[in-house]
Amino acid sequence: MVLSLLLTPLAAACLLPLVKNRKAAGFVVCLAAACIAGLSVGVAVLHFDDGWQLDLSAYPFLSYLLLGIEVLLAVYLCVAGLRGKKPLVSLLAVLGAGLMAWHELTPGGRAAEGPTLVMDKLSLIMLLVIGVIGSFICLYTVVFMRDYARHNPEVADRRIFFMTILFLFLFAMFGLVLSNNLQFLYFFWEITTFCSFLLIGYTRTRQASQNALKALGMNLLGGLALCVGIVLFARVGGVADFAGLSGLDSSGGLMAVAVFLVALGGLTKAAQMPFSSWLTGAMVAPTPSSALLHSSTMVKAGVYLIIRLSPLLGNTTVGRVVTLCGAFTFMMTALLAISQHDAKKVLAYSTISNLGLIIMCAGIGSAESLWTAIMMIIFHACAKSLLFLAVGSVDTRIGSHDTEDMDGLLRRAPMLAMFIIVGIFGMFLAPFGMVVSKWAAMKAVVDTNNILLLMTLAFGSSVTLFFWTKWLGKLIANRRGAGAALSGLHILEKLPMFILSGLTALTCMLFPVISQSAILPFLSQMLHVGASSPINDQDSNIILLMLSLLFFLPIIALALFKRIRPKEALVYMAGENTGDNKTFRGSMGHTPQVQLRNWYMESMFGEGTLLRASLWIAGIGLLVGLFVVAGGVIV
């Protein structure tokens, strides 16, 4: 069943290009998505207690096959870099593939290996996130790409190609989280980079091509760092899989450099500063790719890798660098999100910010902080993918994803607005999951006695109030003339968003069960200590009570006030209301139309003010960290 889960998206990716009829292609997508979701749940049920592993070392041709694909992929990306006049991209592609080929084909490249593929509790959680959320995003894509082609006639309709790459990406993500062997991990890692490049450049516009090459260059740089780290692990430490990493001494020497380089690969894929610009640029891609690659799965590959490395981080130089990088990214991108009114950019910066918080917790390396990091992966994937899908549906109906154009959406499209509201609640409102995670993160940071991290967490979390409530206000505003009612949702739009809304609430209700049955056993096994939840039973009961009230109070209020007929009153404006709540008589005798607009504080938190300085500070910080770690080798 696990192999079926791994190979089903690959089979769909191979089949779709052969299907010429778009309706038939949509049927293939729906069937494959249903199989992937069912297999994900089936694997979880079947292997939840005993896990799963597969040793492929008896089939050496597989390693050579993967290496051959890596070389062909490098040739393709090298040509793409030359065509785009980005020779550095071509160089990075050649260096990565060349180093891995040298490592595998020369003596000394085979270190002690355990099982090739392993599924433990963390892998199982990731499989469910990728399989369940990914399959619903694929279902949504069928209708979205049809509407996208209708509303963007200047863009060639390549929806079958788009859906093919989505399934190829799912295959790569399944392989990545199942890989115990680091060389297999690297192969799947590069496939995700390749898929991201193709999806970002889907429209083939100048901006899309430039942003795709930027993302490719940064991720190839991270991939090269990962490759060098893997080679050092194997040739110096004699370790070629995750199972062997826990026994390494990473406090100094070449092993510390190897850990730093592998962590750098994770930071790059997770779009941490100074590499965050590739993710914000990726928002030019159609919305489903943003929901799948750049919110719920691909960027999670980076934090997944950091969590796997966490036993080698903690109170080490590399651990401190990773922690500070995550904390700095968390704070600065939250501030940058304040100045954004493009909904996709708000989602992009808030995604990077939350990934920074996960990285910070993983860098700390304690059982409490790792519990928080894993929980945040789950909560964030559900709520953020829901928001991306809802924004995509808004875009196809009003022709914009600007939050300023979403006036009165709750009146114009109640169901669609409620999906966005649930997603926003899931991100910042108690007692939904992200707030629960930040509560746990606060406790983990307090236990480190690090005042700087504590202040960063407190202020960074409070900043989210600014951009989420501004967006929420535009949705519920009931201004006259905000627009006519919007068309209804197709079942393939409605079903994924409905399920994701339910998962956003359900994961919060079930987090004690998830913690006790999956996360704590994994942490106890990885850290060799008895792990416990940072949120006790009493706090859990309070959270569940608050969540119940959040659902029942509106129902009670409707029952009590359904007979009340409120009288409409004129809105106070900056002058005398003319009586239509849309215009007023100004002081100079003219009659202007009222405008409702949020304050975005661009002069304080705009990209022109904060972004470049933040990238430089983060870049210099990582270079200093590398010099400090490498200095231990020289000494």
Image: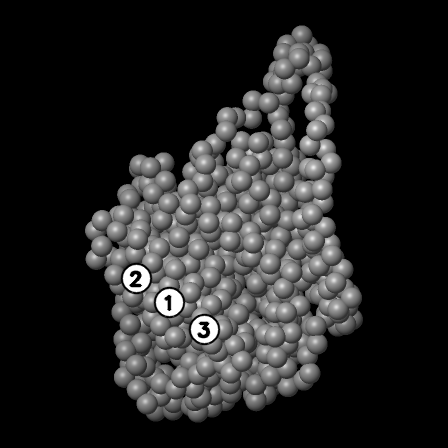
x, y percentage for residue 13? 30, 62
Q: Which residue is mark 2?
A: 13
Q: Is residue 219 left or right of residue 474?
A: left
x, y percentage for residue 140? 41, 50
- Could you tell me how far apart the alpha carbons at marks 2 and 1 are, in whole angstroms? 9 Å
Q: For label 3, count other residues whose C-alpha is less than 10 Å away and answer few (under 14), some (14-19) or many (20+).
A: many
Q: Amino acid at mark 1?
A: Phe
Above/below status of 333 relative to 377? above
Determine the secondary structure under disc 3.
helix
For the residues carrying marks 3 and 2, which lies nearer the camera in this image? 3
Q: Which residue is mark 3?
A: 43
Q: Residue at x 56, y 57 (%)?
A: 503
Determine the secondary structure under disc 1.
helix
Of labels 1 and 3, earlier in sequence is: 3
Residue 171 numbered tag: 1
- Could you tell me how far apart the alpha carbons at marks 3 and 2 are, in whole angstroms? 21 Å
Determine the secondary structure under disc 2.
helix
Of labels 3 and 2, earlier in sequence is: 2
Above/below status of 315 relative to 550? below
Q: Are marks 3 and 2 in contact (CB under 8 Å)?
A: no
x, y percentage for residue 411? 57, 31
Q: For label 2, count other residues whose C-alpha is less than 10 Å away and answer few (under 14), some (14-19) or many (20+).
A: many
Is the image coloured rainbow, by chain, by secondary structure, or in one colour? one colour
Q: Residue at x 59, y 74 (%)?
A: 518
Above/below status of 511 relative to 472? below
Q: Amino acid at mark 2?
A: Ala
Above/below status of 612 relative to 396? below
What is the quadrant of the C terminus in the image? bottom right
Q: For label 1, count other residues whose C-alpha is less than 10 Å away and answer few (under 14), some (14-19) or many (20+).
A: many
Q: Residue at x 37, y 41 (%)?
A: 148
Q: Are marks 2 and 1 in contact (CB under 8 Å)?
A: yes
Q: Residue at x 65, y 60 (%)?
A: 509
